[in-house]
Structures are given as C-alpha cells and as structure tokens.
Image: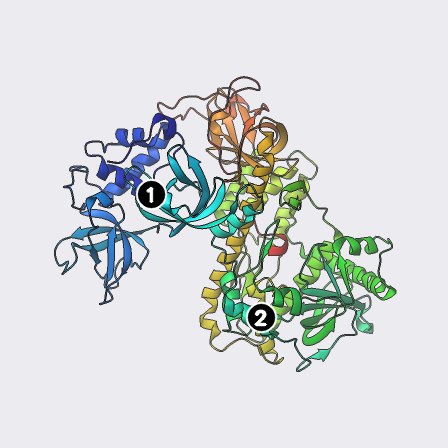
Amino acid sequence: MAKKPTSATRTERPFPTREEVLAFIAENPGESGKREISRAFGIKGADRIPLKALLKDLAESGAIDKRRGSLIRSGDLPPVTVLEVTSRDRDGELTAEPAEWFEEQGPAPKVLVARGHGKGPTAGAGDRILARLSKEGAGEGYAYTARIIKLLAAKPATVLGVYRETPRGPQLEPVDRKQKALEIERDGIKGAKDGDLVSVTVSRRGRYGMDLARVTEVIGSMRNEKAVSLIAILSHDIPHVFPDDVIAEADKAKPATMKDREDWRDLPLLTIDPADAKDHDDAVHAVADDDPDNAGGFVVTVAIADVAAYVTPGSPLDREALVRGNSVYFPDRVVPMLPERISNDLCSLREGEDRPALAVRMVFSEDGRKLSHLFHRVMMRSAAKLSYAQAQDAFDGKTIDADRRVTDALGVLWDAYMALRRGRDDRSPLELDLPERRLVLGKDGSIERIIVPERLESMRLIEEFMIQANVAAAETLEAKKSPLVYRIHDAPSLAKLEALRDFLRSIDMTFPKGGNLRPSNFNQILSRVRDTEHDHLLHEVVLRTQSQAEYHPENIGHFGLNLRRYAHFTSPIRRYADLIVHRALVGALKLGAGGLPKGIEADLPEIAAQISAAERRAMAAERDTVDRLVAHWLADRVGATFTGRIAGVTRAGLFVKLDETGADGFVPMRSLGSDYFHFDEARRAVIGQRTGETHRLGDSVEVKLVEAVPLAGALRFELLSEGKVTAKKDRPADTRTPGRNKVGRAKPGRGKTKGKAKAGKAGGKAARGKRR
C-alpha cells in the first residue's frame, strides 16, 4: 500500500495530482474517502474544496467508482485507469502499460490501445492517458484493450534537480516544486555529490511513495551561481547545444561578396548599443534632406545585418534557428539563435570591417511624418562602435573619444531624432514608465549589485529609428502582396477594460466606454495621476490591462505603438521573425539570392505560433533565472527588513517588490493579521472585515524577509506595515467559508509567521523594450 505522509511531512507536500489520488485509492482499500485522502496528503481548510472538485471529476470521468471504491483483485487493473503509451507493435498499433505498477506484482500487463477512428482524443508514444479497459478483443499477447477517455500530461522523460544525501539515502530535490522528491538508486549515482545539479531518468516505480531514478548527467555544483541560468535552460527545454551539422555549416561560411549589392562603405553608419553588447546587428545614419520641398526634413538610414546571405531556407542553420526562435539573454550568458561564427563574426557590423546589410532609407518631414522609403541590399563599413552612454555624452555636448566625422554624424542623428520625436508624440503610443532591474555579476557569477539603468535619450533614439524601419518593412511587403509575419498587439479585452474601470472608480476616476480605443486614452489617465500616490499603482494596473504582443501572418496592427502595420525587421541575428521579413524583402524586391521559399504561406501560421511560444519560453526562463539569483543573494539576509511596494494582490496573499533590489516575494494571506481579510478584485486590494485594514496594489510597505529558497527563486515576507483603513460602509460582508478560522499576523519580535515560500513572480508582464 502507498505509504501515508507523516505529520512532519504533510504540510510540505504540494496538492496531490490526479494520478497520485488514483494511486492512493487503488493502494488503500477501505481508506478512499475524502477524509482519509485529506489526512494522507495533509489537506486542510479551504484546500478541501478543490479536493472535492477533483474527486467529483474523477468520478464523472469513470476513473473511480464510489460504490466499489478501490476493492480491486490483486493483479487486475481497474476498469478505468491511467496508462502510459510505450510504443507501437509490428502492425503499427499503440501499446501501453499501467502508469502505476510495482515490480513485486510481476511483469506489467500489456494493453492494446484501440484506434479512435477519428473520434475522440488521439495519443502517441510517451503520452499518458486515462482509458477504459476491456478484456474483450485484446488479442494474443495483450491482457486488455483500452479506449482513450482523456489525454493526461506526460510524465517527464528526465527530471532536473539537486542531488541530496539524506538519512534515508540519496534523493533528488526537483527544480520544479510541483514534482515529488525522487529516490536515487545507489548504483545509479554516477559520481554525484551532495548539492550537485543533476538530471535523472525515472527507472521504476517505488513501493513507498517515491519513484526510483538514476542519474544520467552531473551538470555542476549548485554552489556555483553560474549553474542558475543552466537550471532555466534545462527546465524550460531551451536548445543550447548546436548540432554538429549546424556548426559545420557555420564554420564553412565565407564572407559575402559584392554581387547584387550597392557599395555603401563610405557612408558613416554608426552602431549604438549597450556597452557589453557582443553582436551588432543595426547601424544608423541621418542627413538633412536637400529637397527644397521638404525644408527641415531628414533622410534617415537604418542598415541591418544581412543574415539571409548566410542562413538559407531549409539548411541546418535555418532549421536550428527556427527551433530556437530567438536568442535568450541571461545575466551570465547568452543562448544565441545562431552560432558565433554567424552572430558574432560574419553578421556583426564591426567597426571598420566590410559587412553585408539590408538597408532602408526613409525620408521624414520636419514634423516627423514618414514621406517615403526605399530598401537596398548593400555592403557597408561601420564608422564607429558607440555605447549608449558615449552617444548620450555627445548629444549632451560633452567631448567623446571619436573623430570629427563621427561627432558630426551624431549631431545630425540628434536633429533627426528631434523631428521623429515630434511625429512620435503626435502618434501617441502607450507611455508606461516601469523601470526594469539589471543584475551586475562578479567573475564568479554571483550578484555584486542590482541597478535600475537610467533611460537615456540615446536609447529612445535607436528605438524610434528601429520602429520606423519595422513599419517601412511591413508597408513594403504589404504593398507587394508578399507573405510575411507581422508583429501584432491586440487592444485590451472587454473584460480587462471593465476590470480597469472598476479599479478607476475606486480612486474616483473614469475611463471612457465605447468609441475608438487608442493608447492615448490610457496616457490621459496616467498623466492625471503623475507624481501622486496613485502614479506607480496605475502604471502597474494599465500594464496588466494590455494584451500580449505576438507574431502572426494576419495583420491586426500594433495597439501599444499605435501603428496599423508593423513587422520585426531589425534583429535577424537574434529573432527568427526578422529573418522571415528579410527573406520576404529580398524576394519581393528582387534583391538577389536568399528570398522566401515558394509555398511558405501555408507554413506561416505554424511558424508564427512556434516563434511566439519560443519568445514566451525565453521570457519565462530569463525571469526565473533572475528570481533564483536574487533569492541566492538574499539567502543570508533572512530576518532583515526592507521597503517595497505591493506588486500583486491575489486570494492567496500579496506579492511585494522591494525598492532596493526589485526582488519579488510573497506574503501569505494567512499571515496578514487577526482580522479576516477579503480579496476585493475591483480595488486590487485585501480588506479586513472587522478593522477595515486595507492593503492595496501599489502601496508602500515595510517587510521582513522570513525565508529564501534559491532553488525555487522564492522569497517569503512578513508584512510589518499597517494598512490604510477602509470606511465601515465600504467593507465586504461576512462571506467566510464555514469552519474557516481567522489567522493572525506575527508582529515584529513576536512569534513566527507560518506558511511555505511561494515563487515571487508578479506575473503578467507585458512585452516591452526590445520585445516590442
């Protein structure tokens, strides 16, 4: 029978999965009621409600029979059970085995998975299924025939975690906190030492609640902070090792020639990037327009590395780039979309070296309106490599280490930017001011300090030039009726807008209903609260109201930028979407070899979905890494107090972002105070029923760090600040769940705060900056 959790371990277990509940029912005859399951898994209080729902769902799906319970004959499988599809037989039929099976029971019975004939869910090798079994028609060698009821989440083939030596023997502490600890077979340690990051494969089902596993790879010591980004890479399945044929193709690549190119090597194009940038894929130039009909106007040139000259459709390089979707940036490393031979060498617009590029010349009026544009395939030579800080110094009139040709070019760039900024102000894109933290690491990979970089006008200059080049690319391809992948950003949903209106009413503000919604509508309400107590709060709320930008072959415009047509063109070294646009331009404008392959239109929806998913994967991995590094850095400051702001309000508790570091942590609801706190979704707040004490999104607070869990990237705080008081008439009615007790906050120096650490992620961050 399944081993029951002891009182010491019950509160540490996560909520059980469907498979765990099914296993417990099967393995514990006479102990399959809700009360027994609650006791076994340490489920208390309000958590019994989702357990009741889970049991109801299992019963309705046929997974459990309340009349017969778990009284199953030894050696038999229940009529409805969880199976793992293992392979196909010689006739191409799927075969499966029970997901829960002990070696002591003998060989697992083989199950033939019946074909669905186009109806219902379909499965493949490696899938987990909930199936209804029958002994009729099983055929020779099979004990049962299975008909699929539902596909379940597949059990991971490998599990990533930290190897631990415990009194009970070697175990794995999984990186994913939702997974159970695993017992490591003593002859399957593979030289791992306590604290090592390892990957394991589950070898067989243990009898006492833990799966048995064997170490497949020792990745490195968790005592080295450089292993932290590797956790994110592996746990998010980010491809990080280039196949041999991809490296071989990159190594064989030869520098591009002048064939089908214009010679622009004398044009003083400049690269302006972060000081630590390793690849440079864009360069800019501007000159005053000499057309008398465009007095005060400018001709702005944006040149982008010609990646299409080296990465051809269907090649190993191309296939791998599509799988990766984009480069992924961590504080201590970059996982590039393309090998260094391409990204950091042949396609990097290095100062003083000939490089192929796809360039667009755009003519702007004095008020920043784009009048025309034209694309060219060129050979260029960067006149200078500048950092944002150097360019800003030049814009501010300071002396920089550059020749007169470069400083003159910077002067005209600034003048052109002033014109484009007027056009940008007229367009009125969404203006959100939410500074992002940056981790500065030492040589050993540990954090030295956390900073919020200053937002320089030199950064805004490059951003605006790139936006205009992206618009020009979309307009050209649309005019040519060429297939392409747009960068789209939908307007906020009606539900989110109504939630915003509810919130604004709570601070005596309104938001218009109906009409043509524009970003300027949001900018107006943001300007009304500037430098008030609601300033930071409203920026957070407006951010959460927005949709997420993505890639799609059908255009709906870009709401946040207030643009009708927009496509990513300016970063083909690190984004596959840009490479598609480059190829489309080469083909549509007949600029030589390397255009889009014929028939790609049918594949673009799938490609767009794939690269959108890769972008979300990268964002999650980057965020997880920062959270883990910060938790590691703060682990020796448990007990210290910090100031911060409430960055998220949920039924479970409050997320707090620290002022000093930008670190996110969690304050469990049960630790808030002696009152009963209600979650008020409209106000983005929790309100004490008796006292009216209120904690709201955006409030400044003081907290104490109670727990730091580096492996999970989790911080748990105790709230020290008293909340503001809501008037009695505005407090929620008593809607407590019967039997649910009030909980008390431990005041400073008085007792301990209960509750497990939870990942400190405010969530829902909209794509901004480089991801526009």
Of 615 and 537, nearer the camera is 615
Colour scheme of the rendered structure: rainbow
The outermost residue toward the bottom is: 259
User: Dividing the picture into quarters, in which one does residue 703 lie?
Assistant: top right
User: Residue 235's spot in the image, x, y percent?
Assistant: 47, 49
Dot 1 lies on which element? strand
Residue wearing tag 2: 250
Of 269 and 169, nearer the camera is 169
Dot 2 lies on which element? helix
Q: Is residue 546 visible?
A: no
Q: Is residue 320 visible?
A: yes
Q: Residues within 10 Å of mark 1 (few under 14, many from 20)?
A: some
Apparent side of residue 439 relative to residue 106 in the rendered image (left or right): right
* Residue type pointed to by label 1: Asp
Q: Residues within 10 Å of mark 2 (few under 14, many from 20)?
A: many
User: Residue 594's spot in the image, x, y percent?
Assistant: 57, 77
Of 29 and 703, nearer the camera is 29
